[in-house]
Every structure is written in C-alpha cells, then in structure tokens.
Image: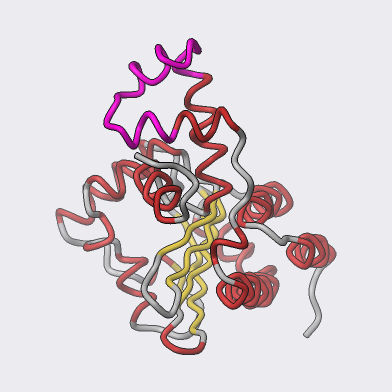
Amino acid sequence: MVTTNRAEAILEELDQADTLDKLYRVTFRMRDVYDVKHVVYYWVNSVGENYGAGTYSPEWAERYVEKDYNKIDPVVLGCFQRFDPVNWKDLDWSSKAVKGFLKDAMDHGVGAQGLAIPIRGPSGQYAVLSINDAREDDDWDVFIREYKRDFMIIAYEFNKKGLEFEERGADQMLGKLSPRELSALTYLARGLSRVQAAHHMKISEHTLRVYIESARHKLGALNTTHAVARAINSGLIVA
C-alpha cells in the first residue's frame, strides 16, 4: 500500500522505538509532521492493563480520568462498535452530557475534529490511534481523504509495536527512571501533595511536574496516578 513521505518518516521512527518513552516521542513527531493538534495511541493488552502514549496535556489526561469521561466519550464508545476508521463527526454528540464533555475537552486544547482508527489484536488486545485537530469541516474532509491511508498503516504499525512490548514483557520495556523521577513518584505514592513533594525535593512545583511527566512517559502511564501504580507494581518504588 502506497504511503506519503510523511508516513515513511513516522514508520521509520516507529520501527526504532524500543521503549514506551520512545513510543511517546513518535506521537509528538507525528503531530508535528502532519500539523495537527494531537495524536494519541491507546491500547488495552490481553490481561486488561491500559497503556497510553499521546500529546494531550497532562491536565486534560488527569481530568478525563477524574471525570470518568471514558463512560460517555463518543470516540471510545464508537470505536468499540466499529472496525473501520471513525470520523468524529459521524458519532453522536447530541446529549447534554456529551456536549459538556466536548466543551471541557476544547477548553483543554482538544480540537473538535478527529479521526479514530480502531485496531484489534490477538487474545482480546484492543487499541485506538486518534488524530485530532481544529480544522473547518471542508478542510478536515480534504485532509482525511489525503492522509487516511497513511493513518491506517501507521495505526497498524503502532499496534505491532504495542504487541511486541507485551510479548517481551511490560517490565522490560519500561524506560529507566532517573533518581529525581523516582523520588517524585515515591513522594506522591506516600500521599504527599505536589507542593509537599516539591518542598521535600527542594525544587519548584514546575520542576516537579517536569519530572512527573517524564516518568509518566517512560512508564506508558495514562496519568500521574497510573504512573505511580505502574512504578509500584514494577518494583521501581516502594510506597
């Protein structure tokens, strides 16, 4: 299947990604190459553990989990019921709750346009690659016609990489955390607030956030809570 030069660049980087942290970097690279607002790859492995890699802000990732938006998110619900690429415009956004969710998402930098590629692997493994933007309808339609084939191929390769990680064992794929990243997660695991953790580490809250986000990327965590849980379960920190 023929792909554009943009896709070739992304596929080359995907092929070289051997840690979850590097998989994160590919989503940012893809966002920039295709000039869109966000790219997110999310998968659930065969035993039900969630992984995520993407360019949404940490504030939105935390809020999404806090509000249990996965229960009403038309993209999540729609992709579970489909096998082909899903244009967000074709989903049902009519309910009051969903309209509120969309407004909240846009307030956090998420565009109203999107294309989601559902992928299903062996033993119940499931994944979605989403491309998000704020183009006008006509421009978005042109964009999708031009690049949908790219995105389908890239989604397949993203999932191949996810399956490789699962086969090798998730613990082997965790990026090595720095001592400061480990300290930040340890303080949070012990119940300290970010303000308290920053005070103990003698750093600013901004610097603490940098350490936490770096650790989250390396761990393939969907949010800070998930990062702490993964670090504990992997024996990287002791609460």
Q: Residue at x 38, y 29 (%)?
A: 187
Residue 108, how many percent across, how many down? Answer: 39, 37
Q: Residue furthest bottom?
A: 122
Q: Residue at x 67, y 71 (%)?
A: 154
Give 209 or 78, whichever is nearer the viewer.
209
Q: Residue furthest left?
A: 96
On the rendered image, what quadrant is the C terminus found in? top left
Give 24 or 79, whichever is nearer the viewer.
24
Number of marks in the rendered image: 0
Left or right, 47 with reference to 74: right
Left or right, 44 with reference to 76: right
205 inside magenta stretch: yes
Classify 197 as above or below 12: above
Q: Residue at x 51, y 77 (%)?
A: 85
Left or right, 227 with reference to 167: left
Left or right, 70 with reference to 39: left
Q: Residue at x 22, y 63 (%)?
A: 71
On the rendered image, what quadrant is the N terminus found in? bottom right
Residue 196, how many percent across, how many down? Answer: 33, 17
Figure colour scheme = secondary structure
Give 168 or 224, whichever is nearer the viewer.
168
Q: Main secondary structure of the magenta part?
A: helix
Stretch of the chain drawn in magenta: 185-206
Residue 68, how many percent across, how many down? Answer: 22, 54
198 inside magenta stretch: yes
Residue 163, how many percent across, how many down? Answer: 59, 77
Classify 27 as above or below 204: below
